[in-house]
Image (cartoon, grey):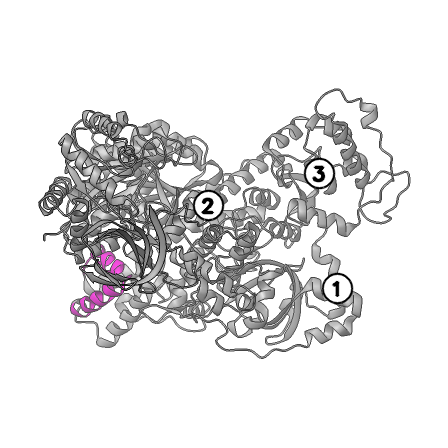
Amino acid sequence: MGPFQHLHVASAYSLRYGSAFPPALVARAAEHGMDALALTDRDGLYGAIKHVRACHAAGIGAVVGVDLAMSDEDDRIVVLAKRDGWADLCRLVTAAHYAGDRGQPRVTMDLVGRHAADGRLIVLLGPRSEVGRAVAARRDQQARDLLQRWRAAVPGTAVEIVDLYGYRDVNTATHLLALADSLGLPAILTNAVRHLDPADYQVGNVLDAARKLVPLHGRHVESSSHAYLKNAEEMGRVALRVCGGDRARATRLLGVTRRAAEACVLDPVEVVPLIDEVDPRLHLPEIGGDPIPLLRHRCEDGLLDRGLNRSREARERLAAELAIIEKKRLSGYFVAVAGITDMIRGMGIRCAIRGSGAGSLVNYLIKIGEVNPLDHGLLMERFLSEGRVGLPDIDVDVESARRLDCYRAILDRYGESRVACVSMMETYRARSAIRDVGAAMGLPPHEIDAIAKAFPHVRAKQIRAALDDLPELRDSGLNDRALETVFRLAERLDGLPRHIALHPCGVLVGNTGLRGRTPVERSLLEFPMSQFDKDDVEDAGLLKLDVLGVRMQSALAYALTEIKRVDDADVALDEVPHDDAATYDMVRESRTIGCFQIESPGQRELVAKLEPRTMHDLIVDISLFRPGPVNSDMVTPYLESRHGFRAAVYPHAELRAALAETNGVVVFHEQVLRIVDVMTGCGLSEAEKVRRSLSSPDGRTRVRAWWEMNVRPEFDAATVEATWRVLDAFGAFGFCKAHAAAFALPTYQSAWLKRHHTAAFFAGVLTHEPGMYPNRVILDEARQCGVEVLPLDVNRSARDWRVEKVGPPSSDPPLFGQGYGLRVPFSAIKGISEAEVERMIAGQPYVSMADFWERARPSRPVAEHVIEVGGLDAVHGLRPGEPRWRPGRLTRRDLMAQVGALDRAGGQGSGQLPMAFADHVAPGELPEMSEAEAVEAELSVLGMDVTRHVIAFHDDFLDALGVVRARDLLRQRNGAEILVAGVKVATQTPAVRSGQRVIFTTLDDSTGPVDLTFFESVQAHTAATVFGSWLMVARGVIRRTGRRGISMRALHAWNLTDLDRVWRTRGIEAVREILADRPEEGRGVIGGKKITYENGYELSPYADLGVKEPQRVLWHASMGSSGKVA
Amino acid sequence: MSRLYGDPIEVWVRDGQPVRFVWRDRLYVVRQILDHWVVAREWWKTSATDPGERRFWRVEAQSGTYELRYDTATDAWLLLRAWD
């Protein structure tokens, strides 16, 4: 028997349906000796590029199609592209997505007919189609009519024969076959594949339940235990079965199937141009003219504008860059990107280049970016080089609040047919898998929520390991047998795609042929979105531009408008000199909370040690704070030679030029390129290729051999070995200097604004929330800079944080923000709607609560929130605190009661309400809120303590305990064991050198941050407290790390609220007894196999590796943090 | 008319298909297979990791039509129904 060709195969990219990834399917097909394999995912071509690539690598023919729904979800057809039908298929998928509701593509016979008119598509009508269902129901005439109509509409109509061994499957198949024969239509055998192996059907059942949002039940699941990638022998049996044992007919069925497959094998280079590494057929933007002279002219103009026209260095560099760009035929791409950045700046939006693109002089000359690569010794080869396979992509940062405006402008300029955003697949991870499986197993929603949140953001397949490994989960009761099945199944969902989303920054800019090269669907915000992710897009030869929304850019822009509004000053932030001593002094004292890139606890420690004085120092600082440099232990030697404790050491005199800028320590990718180039003379392009190879174990082995062969003879063996160790350690990590230089600019700008326009800077940070800390921390930092925090006031508050002048300004440290206040905005109120904010602003000023109620028309809960946090205090002369009973004088609670009365009177907005009634308040009827209640209300309504710091309520207790405050930490000697306390601000579990899971926790005690490190040895008795409580007391040992650097190694932690309760009920001795607990430090507390990299670098499996997800809570929790365990 | 039985039976299999079976001390020879289908077990109701599947055969033997069931997890055959 010959090979079989599967022409109906769903991969995991059939969302919540398939369970196997394209490469696995292709590998299995190759094992079975198959010569071709189709991928026909549901609703899209999400996996097509990966499929074609895998088929090409495995040397089998790639067929691509799509499984589309007709009138309803259960009425499905398969459309295959013939050899030249890829573009038609892309267009059909796009049309289907624009015809149905978003995310529910639908086609009609007519729509398919129009796309198949040129005969480049085949339609398969199987048991799931209307035809198949008519046959199953024995409505033979209807089935016959339908088939004839299909044949008239689509020349390539065929009947699909499937038998999954379900009840009556074979009868339907036999009837369909007979019908095809009587109409003279080709019949094709498939296995409607969903899985790789038979046992995967359990996952299929769970996916069915998750897709249909129903519990697992025999009624809802689809039988799929036979819908796996059967081999030719198994398919031969199926063929014989559906042909009723007629061997000749079965042979004919398999023959027709083979011929259909042969007609559909695509030319891989057509779909994935980058398979052709030498001369890929790129898809270039249309720019209306010959791009080569256009780019040359723009660069010439740029030389003049940037004052570089007399620089020989610049001219030589430009010539070299242009030569590569023109050789790769990319001139048009640069012209198009420059056009877009011009347009964005023309719209008044801040825009900065990021990433390796900053290393290109062309980008600087045509004003895509503001970083001059010649100033910082940046190399273009890191961005674009002759030897590099793949496409360059230019990244720009814009204000996050206006990112979508930029997208719209790009769409308007180039037109929908030439532009598409890039998508990304969100996949199942521990929390999402537990949610879906829990729902399928019928657990109550609140229980599912509690279970899911207890886990850190780990991979789904780590769920059961995490239960064993992490002390906070081990003792949680989640280890229950009853949940075993849930966890077992949740692990099976690991990594399966579950949702397609707009990529945060990628935009494709192409020509009118774009829609024939990628299928496009609509994103949530109705942007055209390619079904390909960022890697697929590159493989498909599509050029993209990354327009990333950066909150800090929005924060900076907002700060500038506040400076203009309050002080009537125009600050040209991009022209501020980069050598302001006051700014660097502030950074060196690690007062960097709120600043770009340097506000985390680790960075605050590093800037204190590094003491930056110039932009170059900031570039080094940013580059050092990465896994790479930490991994190869560069930080300590760098700091030692920087501060003169140790002379700079160079592996070889010839490497001095490359390494002098960092005192002999390798910090940047660019230095790796230079080392490789100097020692082998291979040229920078080749060196870049070598550097890229270092990221895979295979590549490292190859490079090692290459290195020993090619190093020039004048370098002795010891030098060769020493430099190899550095290159090897640098491997996948390290940092691109161009990237760091691009980052350093907004870092400096944010620090400069914080130092010189403190209140406006914080207004921007509070409004756009660019950093890791929640707003209550930023607010506290503002207070410590001397900025006053002003409560909500219905007559003074605005939509966003506003700066107000409150007294004579002074800019002397430490209170350099004095003289200004920050007003709590309406938008901070919990549950307030956009329309309410607008009405509140439009109605200002108000004379009374009733007036506010009448004209601003807030909902009752919002009105109550406004009163609770003092929004009407100024209008009515209220003040929370003692005495609480104030006969004859109005209180906040009186106002709240009155809101209730007004609401019940139902007069809101009617205009019917007699003002006299509304204004009738019985003053003093209810007690005023205490200060503690007021702060509690602020925390619950605004998510921050405005009038007092929450820790202030525990001051007496903390003093009684002898807790050391943050401002006094610097007076502690190294090694002292002390108690600290505060509000938890952040927990992080970053990747660290030792391979431990280390928890970094920051507490804020109103005098500054206290940074605590919990090593694994103490986590058995502390992890649950650290992740689960908000107010904490901790015991730790002081560790001095520099003149101003200080941190603490934690030994134990307690929940402050619990201790306070004990103090109040049982006295200080009882508390001391609790604090006397000194559990033994454990070893191997955190289980789990450490992730070991080839170069010996170890990483805890619970370290943060992904990006953080945005969340609005009281403290920052990084991805590796567990949630509260119930 | 069919009757439900559910009796354990012994079955001879060739090429994955039943060819003979003994039911109530009588030997039946399968003349023709009329239908065959497979049902996956509702595994989420069981605690076993692999609950297996149930394979059904409707066969014609002397003096009637019979429905046989094979459970892969228990490796056991039942005679489910008979038509006479």
- Circles 1 and 3, Cβ within 8 Å, touching? The answer is no
Which numbered disc flags the more N-terminal residue, 2 or 3?
2
Which quadrant would the C terminus of chain A be assigned to in this image? bottom right
**Taking A1035 as reference, is A125 left or right?**
left
The amino acid at mark 2 is Val
* Same-subunit check for callouts 2 and 3: yes
- Which residue is found at the position 76% from the left and 52% from the top? A932
Which picture quadrant has residue A128?
top left
Q: Is residue A934 visible to us here?
A: yes
The amino acid at mark 3 is Val
Q: Which residue is mark 2?
A: A214
Q: Element under label 2?
A: loop
Q: Element under label 1?
A: helix
- Which residue is found at the position 42% from the left and 50% from the top? A743
| Magenta residue span | A682-709
Q: Position of residue A796 (x, y in %)?
A: 69, 34
* Same-subunit check for callouts 1 and 3: yes
Numbered circle sitting on residue A866 = 3
Which picture quadrant has residue A95?
top left
> Would you say residue A685 sits in the magenta stretch?
yes
**Taking A1057 as reference, is A486 left or right?**
left
Q: Is residue A390 visible to us here?
A: no
Chain letter belonging to callout 2: A
Q: Position of residue A700 (x, y in %)?
A: 25, 65
Q: Which residue is mark 1?
A: A1061
Q: CA distance from mark 2 to mark 3?
A: 41 Å
The amino acid at mark 1 is Arg
